[in-house]
Amino acid sequence: MSRKKFFSKDLIFYVVMLAFPVLQFCIFYIGVNGRSLLFAFQTVDQYNNATFDITALSNAFHQLFTKTMLIKIGNSFLAFLLTYSIGTTLALFFSYFIYKKLAGSALFKVFLFLPSIISSIILATIFHFFMEEAVPTISNQWFHNTISGLMSNPDTRFGVVIFYNVLMSFGTSVLMYSNAMSGLSNEIVEAAKIDGCNQFREFFHIVLPGIFPTITTFAITSVAAIFVNQLALYSLYPGGADASIQTIGYFLYIETLRAGDNQAQYPLLCAFGTLISLVAIPLTILTKFLLERFGPSDK
Amino acid sequence: MKSRDRILDKFAPKKKSSVSIFSIVIIVFLALYCLTLITLFIWAILASFKEPVMEWRENVIGLPYSFYTDNYEFSLGRFYVDVTDPVTSESIQVTLPYMFLYGFLYAIGCAFAATIVPMIVGYVTSKYRYKFSKVIYFVVVIVMIIPIVGSLPAEIRMARRFNLYDQIWGMWILKANFLGLYFLVFYNFFRNLPDAYNEAAKIDGAGNFRTMVQVIIPLAAPLFFTVLLINFIQFWNDYSVPLIYLPTYPTAAVGMHQMAAGNDKELQYIPIKLAAAIIMLVPILIVFLATHRKLLGNLTMGGIKG
Amino acid sequence: MKKRFLIGMVLPLTAASFVVGCRPTSSGDKIDVTKTQIYINNFKRGFGSKWLDDLKTRFESLHAEDSYEEGKKGVEIIIHSIGSTADSRKANILSGVDEIYFTEQSYYYDLIKYEKDGVLYDITDAVKNPLTEYGETKSIEDKLTEEQKDYFYYQNEGGEKKYYALPHYAGYFGLQYDIDVFDNYMFYFAKNPISPEYPFIRDLTDEKTAGPDGVEGTFDDGLPRTYDEFFKLCDYMVENDVIPFISTGANANDYLNLLVNAFAADYAGKDNTVAKFKASGTVSRLGNVDSNGNVTPIPDETLTIDTGYRAYKSLGFYYGLEFLKKLTSNKNYYFRGANGSGGLDSSAYSAKSAQDEFLISYRDSKRGKSKDIAMISEGIWWEAESETTSETLSGGNPNSPYAKMNRHFGFMPFPKATMERYEESNKNTLFDHLFSLMFVKRNVASWKAPLLLDFMRFANTDESLRAFTRITNTPKSLNYTMTDEDKAQMTAYGRNLIELKENSDIVYPGNSSTIYQLNSGWFHHNSQYSALIDGVRNDYVWQALPKVSAATYYNGMYAYYSDYWKNLAK
């Protein structure tokens, strides 16, 4: 399959196959994000006439450093740290369990994937009502302790939202991790066993380093999604989530929805997006660099 | 053949699976996890059979007093979305069967587009080592690590400009990109596929296209179906995109969203909302239980290099 | 595998061919082809559509013999009840089939100016000409208040003045009280109390205080005049094992903003409240409040377009917040569900559930199954909205003590924040927050326009307005008089509302000032209670008030609006 041999035929095939995907990419990725970037440098009046200036950008910049926005940024980070650390740790353990085909692993696999197949709006509806109605009732009837709904109580709501997100997070990750684990070379695992390696050591010394590339990929996508993650707040709180638990992702989604077809609102939102991207990009690149630099070397 | 393998598996001597403390800890967490989900579902099912006004006041966690099915009847009757037909300007009531149809068309088309494009691009870029292949791989990685936030308004504008807005097929085109995890999955798969397949096909006189369609794609079929299914389920459940892009084609997920967010008198009752949730839950649950074996195998993804 | 793979490839393509033309054929409107149709869009919420069914029946029979299209005789009205407001459907109004809209939370000027030409039909003549064909000498315009005329008589760029819409129903928010419960427990203040510790009447025949309006012999006698009295009453209710009030938790953000808004408007009074929405005129009852809640009055100020935010110094806001703070800081004051799983503390507890509980608890308390609830924080639509629950309770028996017609409710006139304020003026002020409109869409066929305008005029005859009030037991926001015969067909609550409306000043926030025209969506009632607290913007009173004092919130509101004001279009 060297290039010289089949140059022209291969090239035609290659170009034909890639033409549509590349065109699609140019329009709906480059074009869209370019337009978005352009909006950030514009002002749109009530008749949708756009003029270039940096009002939106400077307003967005100004607002970004208000406490209102800093809290949303903080929440985005906190949510990432919590859901990623708890979610990934559990996901790796669970994957290992499934990889080892321990008792009941087939059933667990189905359960772990279950939340991913059910519309978030359905699960969130059930979860919301359970936390608000059933939990206080249980607390009262069984433990004679009157509490308010866990999702309206300011002390518990963020925790409950994180809990929900961790609960829902296992599907694809467990699938990918466990499949990556089954791709590990059997000889190494068996050899380790003969050496008297127990499951705990096997997990940390053989399996984890073995699937590190997959872990890296997930870590990078998670970091990249820090400011996109809405924490399912839109589904969990149909009436609007409290300012103290909002994330940037939720905020931008809600504001875009609110703006509707009122294009005068777009520049500020796009300016926000642009500025946030300026934070997110180096952060993701740094994560990738650190993971590659300090992670176990790849083969 | 397959089933015999499975039977043989059962009788094969088990690998030593000593029950260590480590695995007990994991099993405890897994059990807690499953218990949480089961509790949620059972509670919701029981609640959906409770009379919503008088009974619900006093019976939130117990068994239903009687098997009250009116909630389901009501939810089924209320499952519609009013839209205005853009051509005839008529007011249309989109009922549940149509929402399922739109949901299906949206999900199957988008899933197909979002699976076949990464597959073809993954194949072509992994097997044809032009410089541009590297560029594509690099682009995917870059896009993955460059989060662009808040481009939704611009995307809506673009979709309107190309007349893809409020068209189901328009969404298929919008979703036909090769970006994301599944490109890496396919790329990884094809890169690990020995070149011998291609070379053998070449020797048999097959052209590039024939090789791809008759030799390579069948090899990738299990993987293709897995990704297709996962994508299908995701698109089926997604209400936020159709809510914005398909105002006159409300999908089943959008219908559920309207029910959940609805403020109509009757929709304010929790048992009725839960009945609606369960109506939406059942079909997808059946699809999942019927396909989970296929769904839960096959996927592997390497690291990101570049 | 290959076969299935092919199926996988082919299936979506086959599906694709189905997409074209795959729509439900119509809404299932079965139209009578021998008649001319009028399509009406009704926002279906609390007020329901019974009143519209009545209007339809009367209008159809009135024109049963008239012909509007060749070969057709009579009119058929098709009603589409929709759960979304006209404002949120702006983009679909012109393309939609519906010709006449009854809606709420819709911003008149935004609809007039939407995409330059707007979506509203010019109804000036229909509004200005006397309703002689219906035997009235007055025009619809004559039934509008001065404020409504100012708002609806829009002056376009050419200097011409036009009517494009009319006010529809009214929405006043506040505390609704159960007169039956109040009577049972004698929750009224005595004119001559036997001791300062026990200020309440001991027998229903005891003389009561003059109540908030200061006039003896009126419906509000014995009701609390000041916040002090109000909370004394709440304590007394708790002693009597009665829950003072119930509220939804699911809509707490909106509902409690509205409750504060109602108390704020009542304290400030009509003129001061309206001044904020115009950014002009003199405002009084302003003040500074320090963190300990000490109030220092500020002299009256004249607002300009640049200093409109000074209206947020109105002490009405402070006292409104203070009222809510007190009302919610004592957990015994509000319904929390039998298990703590309901009411204000649960974001799953809907407004409907609260209404039901309010009604059901009255019956169940008699069976020892629950406590009585004295008040509900709701808008005046609540009784119409909870009609089915009343029917369930009475079992359809009109003589049941739980039947709608046999129950007694009232809108509690606002107690004043202080005795001085009470003595200064004891006029009750109501805030109409619903922005409810009736209009015809702009692009109706010219042959049909006269028929649609005729319907609009018909809907605003005294007869139709009275019918609306009789059926919904709520007043419309136009001026018309209910006869005694009408009143006899209404619930006690409906009669109470009529009396209340007649005796109150009504704030109608819509007005023709430039700042309002350019920012009417922003001036929406719900977006008026943002506050910067510790530098963080908070949009809903209920999200912060449990944690901060009323003074902090009040100062946070001023901080937010004085800064935000520069962003408004002027």
Image (cartoon, coloured by chain):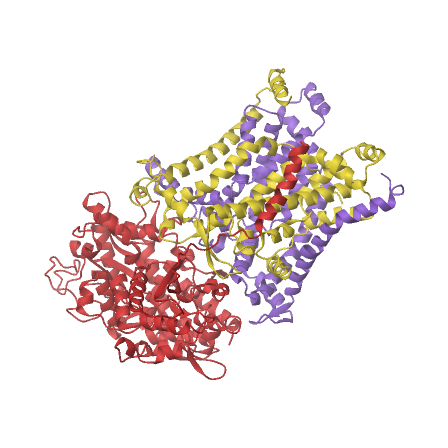
Chain colours: A purple, B yellow, C red
Percent across and percent down for residue A132 are 40, 45
Q: Determine whether A274 is above or below B184 in the image.
A: below
Residue C175 seen in the figure: yes
Question: Where is A187 relative to A66, above or below?
Answer: above
Residue nearest the viewer, comparing A108 with C152: C152
In which quadrant of the rendered view does residue C275 lie?
A: bottom left
Residue B301: image location, x then y, percent: 69, 37
Q: Is residue A179 above or below residue B9?
A: below
Is residue C321 in view? no
Residue sitting at x 29%, y 44%: B54
Q: Is residue A225 left or right of residue B64?
A: right
Camera-nearest residue between A233 and A74 = A233
In the image, farthest residue toward the bottom: C159
**In the picture, which quadrant includes the N terminus of chain C?**
top right
From the top left corner, tell me how far across and down residue B64 is, in percent.
33, 36
Which residue is nearer to you in this view: C384 or B198?
Answer: B198
Q: Which quarter of the picture shows residue C301? A: bottom left
Q: Nearer the viewer, residue C215 or B244?
A: B244
Q: Give the left or right position of residue A142, taking residue A158 as reference.
A: left
- For this view, does B278 lie left or right of residue B205? left
Residue A36: image location, x then y, percent: 64, 61
Q: Is residue C413 above or below residue C151?
A: above
Count of numbered circles on the image? 0
- Please tell me which residue is depicted at 50% across the width and 34% down the height of the picture: B33
- Seen as rendered, the residue at the extreme right is A4
